[in-house]
């Protein structure tokens, strides 16, 4: 089956750098997604990795190692508004829909 | 970018009634739409996948007679929660994918409260 694991909670201070890890076990692989979700809102797309390596997009970067079944989301120059839940997601066994990890709640303090 | 809307954004209903939630792709044709449910402080759980013009595929443990899904056109899918009970109170989120894109675009969600 498909399994996606990530830490439940993390805390950091403004201006810092934080890395949110995700490990996955899937029967097939069609890429890994990261979404941000603020409380009471729908998830918003952050990144999609299908090849190994680091993809940088402004303050956010995402890394993938397919051989290790591992990804991380790197957030730099943290701001208070980055306090949210960060969801790691991959495709289900049929390869048709995204399934999500439990999400990592990040709290950024001043 | 691709926009997905949901209606209503929130609904309160009495136990035993049915509630319909609409999901629309506003600027693209969604060949596939997905319905998720999210309980407080939990992640999104996939309920079902629907393809335009065919029956929805439900995930294990999701009652298809209780959660009726209709994907009648390339821009509209509906989820009807029949005979709703308080335990059905949740945040329901739809997403849509076009024929050419792997990315799923999410609607803003519908908060259902069953009294």
Image (cartoon, rainbow, N blue to C red):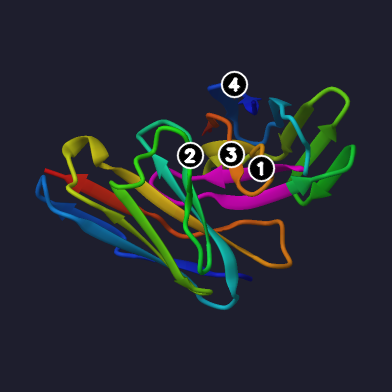
Q: Are marks 3 and 2 in contact (CB under 8 Å)?
A: no
Callout 4 crowding tier (Cα within 10 Å): few <14, some 14–19, many ≥20: some
Callout 2 crowding tier (Cα within 10 Å): few <14, some 14–19, many ≥20: few
| In this rendering, position of residue B93 left or right of residue A107 | left
The disc label shown at residue B59, or none: 2
* Label 2 and label 1 in one chain: no
| Residue A40 on the magenta span | yes
Residue drawn at 26 percent across, 57 percent down? B10
Name the residue carrying label 1: A94
Residue drawn at 78 percent across, 26 percent down? A70
Q: CA distance from mark 4 to mark 2?
A: 25 Å
Subunit of label 1: A
Subunit of label 3: A
* Label 3 and label 4 in one chain: yes
Q: Position of residue A53 (x, y in %)?
A: 90, 38
Name the residue carrying label 4: A7
Residue drawn at 53 percent across, 74 percent down? B74
Assign a secondary structure to mark 3: strand
| In this rendering, position of residue A95 left or right of residue B75 | right
Q: Nearer the viewer, mark 4 or mark 2?
A: 2
Q: Residue furthest bottom?
A: B27
* Label 3 and label 2 in one chain: no
Assign a secondary structure to mark 2: loop
Subunit of label 4: A
Assign a secondary structure to mark 1: loop
Q: Nearer the viewer, mark 4 or mark 1?
A: 1
Q: Nearer the viewer, mark 3 or mark 4?
A: 3
| Residue A77 on the magenta span | no
Q: CA distance from mark 3 to mark 4?
A: 16 Å
């Amino acid at each position: 089956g498909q399994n996606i694991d990530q830490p439940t909670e993390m805390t950091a201070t403004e201006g810092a750098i934080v890395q949110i890890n995700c490990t996955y076990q899937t029967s097939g692989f069609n890429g890994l997604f990261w979404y941000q979700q603020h409380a009471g809102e729908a998830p918003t797309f952050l990144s999609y990795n299908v090849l190994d390596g680091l993809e940088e997009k402004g303050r956010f970067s995402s890394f993938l190692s397919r051989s290790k079944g591992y990804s991380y989301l790197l957030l730099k120059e943290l701001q208070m508004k980055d306090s949210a839940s960060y969801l790691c997601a991959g495709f289900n066994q049929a390869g048709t829909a995204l399934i999500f990890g439990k999400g990592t709640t990040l709290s950024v303090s001043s | 970018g691709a926009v997905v809307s949901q209606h209503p954004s929130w609904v309160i209903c009495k136990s035993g009634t049915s509630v319909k939630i609409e999901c629309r792709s506003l600027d693209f044709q969604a060949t596939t739409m997905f319905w998720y449910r999210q309980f407080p402080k939990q992640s999104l759980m996939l309920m079902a996948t629907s393809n335009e013009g065919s029956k929805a595929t439900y995930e294990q443990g999701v009652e298809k007679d209780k959660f009726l899904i209709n994907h009648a056109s390339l821009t509209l899918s509906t989820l009807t929660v029949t005979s709703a009970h308080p335990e059905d109170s949740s945040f329901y989120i739809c997403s849509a994918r076009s024929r050419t894109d792997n990315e799923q675009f999410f609607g803003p969600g519908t908060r259902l409260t069953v009294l």
